[in-house]
Image (cartoon, rainbow, N blue to C red):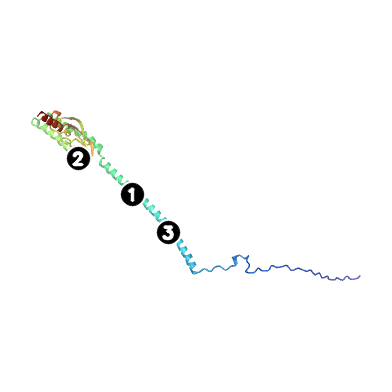
Amino acid sequence: MSEVKEVPIEVKIEIEDEETPEPAPANCQGDTGADEAPEERTMETVEAELEALKEGFKKKIEAVAQAEREQYEAERERLLRTAAEAENTKKRLETGYQRQLKYANEAILEGMVPVLDSLEAAMKSVADKVEVTDASPAFATFSEGVQLVHKQLLDALKTHGLTPIEAAGQTFDPNLHEAVFATESVEVPEGEVIEEFRRGYLLRDRVLRASQVIVSQGPPAEEKEPSQETQSDEIKSTDVAK
């Protein structure tokens, strides 16, 4: 059997060289400025930037300080108003307390006034019916005892602020006096109190009860002096008669 010999076959493949792009020149017009060198920062530029930063921080600090100052002033005003309101409330409470304390016994003293009226009426009745010279010693002693009790009671009530209102012989005062009626009087001038019908009392500076009085209207009409017009008319009539 014959032997088969292997014969090598060489195959040559031609490979075309690919065209590689040539590098663009550095000074090509289509280039962007990315490859340009950055501008150098000078000392003046740095100082200007620092000044701008300082001004910015300064304005921010001033704005914060102004806001804090306004908040402080508003809070201060609020606290001052609160303190003033508290002080006014305290004064009102103290004034109200003092007023209540000042007139706390008003109801008690008002109830004691009729007792004084009864004692005064009893003393007046005894004085009108019995002359001191005709009274027995025992009755005179009793009358003096009633007067003493009246005085002691009046003095005790005065210590608590109760004082009688002076009316007889005084000018009529509508704030203190209550006119029961008015009458003509030759002796008492017009507008003055002739007689005290019922005594009035003051509780410190407040009228507890006004005095009931009789007021004078002055002398009767026929006794009044002629007015100036009447006198002038009389003078004119006399001149005409002459």
Numbered label attached to residue 62: 3
Q: Are marks 2 and 3 in contact (CB under 8 Å)?
A: no
The quarter of the displayed image where residue 172 is located: top left
Q: Earlier in the sequence, mark 2 or mark 3?
A: 3
Residue under the image location 27 percent in, 42 percent down: 99
Report if residue 81 is visible in the image.
yes
Farthest left residue?
133
> Spatial distance from mark 1 to mark 3, Cα to Cα?
32 Å
Q: Earlier in the sequence, mark 1 or mark 3?
A: 3
Q: Residue 2, percent across and down?
A: 91, 70
Numbered label attached to residue 5: none
The quarter of the displayed image where residue 151 is located: top left
Q: Residue 54, percent across and down?
A: 45, 63
Q: Residues within 10 Å of mark 1 (few under 14, many from 20)?
A: few
Image quadrant occupied by the N terminus:
bottom right
Numbered label attached to residue 84: 1
> Spatial distance from mark 1 to mark 2, Cα to Cα?
39 Å
Residue type of the residue flagged with mark 1? Ala
Image quadrant occupied by the C terminus:
top left
Numbered label attached to residue 158: 2
Near-viewer residue (108 or 238) = 238
- Name the element at disc 1: helix
